[in-house]
Image: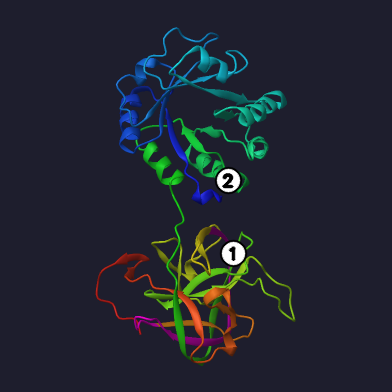
Amino acid sequence: MSARMRERDCWIDLRQAGEWRRGVAEEAVHLRFEAIVSDDPADLAGLPPTVTRVLVVTGAELPGDFGDADLVLADPVRHGDPARLAGEHPGVRFGSRVDVTDAASLDLACERVRRDELTVLRFHDPTHIPLEIVLAAADGADGRIVTEVTSIDEASVHLTVLERGPDGIMLRPGGPGDATKLAEVVRRGSPDLDLVTLTVTGIRHVGSGERACVDTCSHLGRDEGILVGSRSRGLLLCVSETHPLPYMPMRPFRVNAGAIMSYTLADHERTRYLCELRAGSTVLAVRADGRTRPVTVGRVKIETRPLLAIDAVAPDGEQLNVIVQDDWHVRLLGPGGVVHNSTELKPGDELLGHLPGRERHVGYPIDELCHEL
């Protein structure tokens, strides 16, 4: 299962929240976080049943009273195997918590993720290689992995390690609002887009102008590209350069997208002009079946080239247009992932497109009168 389809947990750690402790906990409850964590049972008292109350054991011995904790995180070396602890304390779940600081603790983490129902990991060094190793070791195991982070940026990185990331993120917040930011990062999805079949009505040579090649930091699929259009209400699917060319090598990271004033989707809601994209920007990659993923732009190459205008119509009568480089190797996708060389298109050919359905102001959808001709 791909990372974007998996459900991820949001945990908030109150241990260093200080004066914000109560407010942070209320924020997490409101956002329906999966767990609230503390080393003090008093912090967990009175929390609603919608959240898992997690007690971290910090001493050498287990406390005599777990309070209202639903889950206790213990050190498997100091406190014992979680399965054994659960048998000794009916009604309380136990998980492992491992600080990964060296080779020995990394080996322990790999062992626990293969055995335990839940493992919470903290990585101390500024490298993601230990997390990669643990995730690889856990492949095929039934347990869940939660990693501790101290910032939203760190959470974003953890979620993408080995293209899968952990099953949950536990954040030590810097203050109120961080729980909201974490939820936005962890729960951000890339839902499918509804693609429609368009019918080509004509192609025209329209002189020269500047076109943009969008070079991404990803290896794009053979049925994958980006949506491009002259009008915000209708975009056509321009395919990546993943199909053989007789005179040059393939560029599987590239989409020869279109004229610089064209719209594309930066995400599911917001459009960008191609000329606005920069290194580090995000653009939405779209497959012929509507699956999507955000990809990072590595560079945009803008060069003067002959241009070709392609006109098409949607089933509902919406008129669409895209202006691309006037060359055979610029391609668009049709239903079923059929690849069309742009210069060989003719009226009646079918292409794939998307109809966002609303006008745009600085890229955001808005309901207002706007005619695009």
Q: Quadrant of residue 91?
A: top left
Q: Give above or below for 57 relative to 259.
A: above
Q: Nearer the viewer, residue 272 or 156?
A: 156
Count of number-bearing discs: 2
Residue under numbered circle 2: 164
Q: Give above or below for 202 relative to 324.
A: below
Circle 2: residue type: Arg
Tell whether position 119 is magenta.
no
Q: Main secondary structure of the magenta part?
A: strand
Tell me residue 308's x, y (percent).
53, 87
Q: Which of the marked residues, 2 or 1, is nearer the chain's N terminus? A: 2
Tell me residue 347's x, y (percent).
49, 92
Residue interval drawn in magenta: 295-319
Q: CA distance from mark 2 to mark 1?
A: 26 Å
Q: Quadrant of residue 213?
A: bottom right
Describe the element under mark 2 as helix, strand or loop.
loop
Q: Are dots 2 and 1 in contact, CB under 8 Å? A: no
Q: Residue at x 63, y 40 (%)?
A: 140
Residue under numbered circle 1: 299
